[in-house]
Amino acid sequence: MQRIVILTGAGVSAESGLGTFRDVGGLWSRYDLEDVATPGGFARNPRLVHGFYNARRANMRAAEPNPAHAALARLLAAHPGQVTLVTQNIDDLHERAGASPVIHMHGELARALCGACGARWDAPDAMVPEDACPACGAAATRPDVVWFGEIPYHMERIGAALTACDLFVAIGTSGAVYPAAGFVAEAAGHGAETLEINLEPSDTAAAFDRHLHGPASRIVPEWVATLLR
Ligand code: NAD
C-alpha cells in the first residue's frame, strides 16, 4: 500500500480567491514582508501586523474550498495506504473541505498564540495588541502563524513521514521558501517517487520525477481520480 506525503502551498487556495505570495496587486504586494511576517516587524508595530492578519482572516472566512481541496479530502478518506497532508497555508480550506488531519507547518490564521506563556486558542475575527491572553493575562497575543526566522511546526513528524513515503507530491508551491522547498530532495533521497502539480514549473521543478501543469482545481481532482481508480 502506497504511503503518500502531500505538500500544499498558496497555489491550492488561489482559485478560492486567496492571493498567492507573488500575486501582483495582492495583499502581500502592498506590505513589506519584513514588516508583517517577522518577529522584528511585530515588535516594531504590532497594530500593523494584527491589521494585516485580520484582513487575511476576513478573506479566509469569506472564501470557500475549491475542487482541489475537496479532492485531497477524498484521497485522505479513501486511499488504502497512509496519506500525510502537510500545508504551508495558514488558511483553513483543507479542513473546511473535510480533510483530516492537516499538518499546518506555518501555523493557522484561525488560532491565536500567547507570546508570553505559549497558550493557544481560537482567534477572534479581529485581534489588537491590547488583547489579554485568556490563560496568563499578558497583552502579548499574536496570530499563531510562523514568521520568517521562526522554526516551522511539526518538523519531526514531517521528517519521519518524508523518510518513509513512497510518493511525494507538491501542489501549488513555488519552492522558494525553506525548509518546505527541501522536502522533495529529502523524500527522493529516501527512494520516493516525486510529482509536482503546479500552474507552471516551480523553482524546484528539476528535482521532481514527474510534473502535471495546470490549475489545481482541475489537475488535482483528475490525479486523485486516477489514484483511487
Ligand atoms: P507562492 O505564492 O510562493 O507560490 C505559489 C505557487 O502556486 C506558484 O508556483 C504558482 O505558480 C502556483 N499557482 C498559482 N495559482 C495556481 C493554481 N490555480 N493552481 C496550481 N498552482 C498555482 O506560495 P508558497 O510556495 O506556498 O510559499 C509562500 C509562503 O506564503 C508560504 O509560507 C505560504 O504559507 C504563505 N502564503 C499562504 C497563503 C494561504 O494561506 N492561502 C497565501 C499566500 C502565501
Image (tube, rainbow, N blue to C red):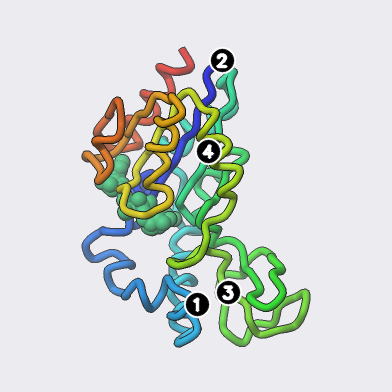
x, y percentage for residue 89? 46, 52
Q: Mark 3 against mark 1, which lies toward the viewer? A: 3
**Residue type highlighted by circle 4:** Leu
Q: Secondary structure at mark 3?
A: strand
Q: Quadrant of residue 139?
A: bottom right
Q: Which numbered tag is attached to residue 1? A: 2
Q: Is mark 2 within 8 Å of ligand 1?
A: no
Q: Is residue 23 visible?
A: yes
Going from N to C along the chain, the mark reached first, 3 or 1, is: 1
Seen at 25% across and 43% down, the residue is 202
**Residue type highlighted by circle 2:** Met
The alpha-carbon separation of the residues under discs 3 and 1 comes to 7 Å
Quick one: 61 or 206, which is closer to the camera? 206
Q: Which residue is mark 3?
A: 142
x, y percentage for residue 72? 48, 33
Seen at 27% across and 29% down, the residue is 211
Q: Secondary structure at mark 1?
A: helix
Q: Mark 2 against mark 4, which lies toward the viewer? A: 2
Q: Which residue is mark 1?
A: 50
Q: Which residue is mark 4?
A: 85
In the rendered view, tell whether residue 50 sits above or below residue 4. below
The alpha-carbon separation of the residues under discs 3 and 4 comes to 25 Å
Q: Mark 2 against mark 3, which lies toward the viewer? A: 2
In the rendered view, tell whether residue 177 sits above or below residue 53. above
Q: Secondary structure at mark 2?
A: loop
x, y percentage for residue 54? 49, 72
